[in-house]
Image: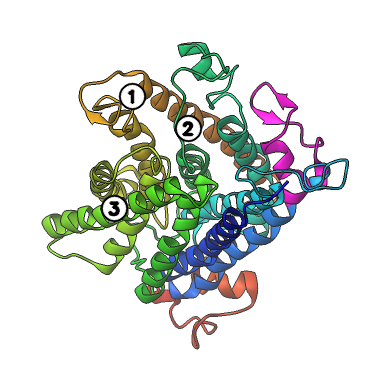
Amino acid sequence: MEWDSGNAAWMLTASSLVLLMTPGLALFYGGMSRAKSVLNMMMMSFGVMGIVGVIYILWGWSMSYGTQSVGGIFNNPFESFGLSGVIYDAGGEWIEGLGAYPQIIDIAFQVTFAIITTALISGALAERVKFSAWMIFAGIWVTLAYFPMAHMVWGGGLLSGAEGSIAAALFGVDADGVANTAPIDFAGGTVVHINAGIAALVLALVIGKRRGFGRVPMKPHNLTLTMLGAGLLWFGWFGFNAGSAFAADGLAGWAWVNTTAATAAAILGWLAVERIRDGHATSLGAASGVVAGLVAITPAAGALNPVGSLVLGAIAGVACAYAVGLKYRLGFDDSLDVVGVHLVGGLVGTVLIGFLAVDGSVFFSDGHLGFGGFEQLAIQVIIALVALVFSGVITWLVAIAIKATVGWRITEESEISGIDLTEHGESAYEGIAAGRFATEGK
């Protein structure tokens, strides 16, 4: 067949943009860490790029997408093991993807999602876990939590709108076998953010707090790195959201504009909270507001209009700005605010689709303001709750298994001297190797 080179070029660009998000995340998290742990924080992201990149080719695509679904939860990991049978057809021709281009481009796009989702979790574990334990966890978690979630939502499983899904059972199907009210998760509210966010919370509870948490200052050591990382994340997110249109078309442009609108509004919402509550609008708040808006619009980028995206972003900015303080009230050490931003932002974005989607939501019907139905809201709440429970249970089981075997924690002495030196034999800045900052909380 004749391929659409424009769509192919756009999707390869989008894939590259999403891959860039993980080094961007490394900068974002690295700047938020203390000086004696910045390299370890960045290595956790780069390590994920290695292990998930390998696993995805071997069995990740097969578990996520295919024709041999196991209970609508995951696909047979051996159906296309090593990408067998999904690149060329029997005649040696490229298999078609989602946008009149070869399917290998879809594979390139999807592996970047698996990488960034797993890397997001690392922000909750800063400065206290063995690098080996993290790498083991990353490989097991992406297999048991991410790939099944991708299959359930995007691969025609239980959380999709396909026949046999929860939505189909609740609302029936049309003549094509599609649920009359299908869940909306355009680019990963459940698959990415709720999935990673609840995993971060579970790990923070299982592993425990950093030494001195709540007593020793643990301020970001380099907010310049954090703001640069936030900028790269925003840039890469256009591949994340606009790329999820799977074509260089109007829907991609719609998602691009909605992504910008929500992110801009979230920055203002976060800074307003800081200014009113604390008296200062901070650079960390601006960077965090960027991520909060991006997270919230991810599932909704193709479903809202630009004004609705402004509303969603503002709500997410305010909600996440307050949510990041919960760790101090509830006593869990979510080191770099993965729970407050990704879990809360993912929930806000996923659920508010039920109120703000331009068609069939509570406040819109056929693209116009008006009091609509509650079916969309109901299914959005259901998929969010299922994602929470599924990922939470899987993460807890994996975390407990690792705790009972190889163990999670570095020694107390290593935490004091700095995880960079003890885990990697390196230090980011002159003087840290000698422990100069160990007693200063840096």
Foreground of the two, 29 or 163: 163
Residue type, mark 1 in image: Gly
Q: Earlier in the sequence, mark 3 or mark 2?
A: 3
Residue type, mark 3 in image: Ala
Residue for point 45% across, 83% down: 436
Q: Which residue is mark 3?
A: 261
Q: CA distance from mark 2 to mark 1?
A: 25 Å
Within the magenta stretch, is there residue 74?
yes
Q: Earlier in the sequence, mark 2 or mark 1?
A: 1
Q: Which residue is mark 1?
A: 360
- Where in the figure is residue 321, as x and y percent of width and height? 26, 51
Q: Residue furthest bottom?
A: 430
Closer to viewer: mark 3 or mark 2 = 3
Closer to viewer: mark 2 or mark 1 = 1
Range of magenta residues: 55-82
Quarter occupied by residue 304: top left
Residue type, mark 2 in image: Leu
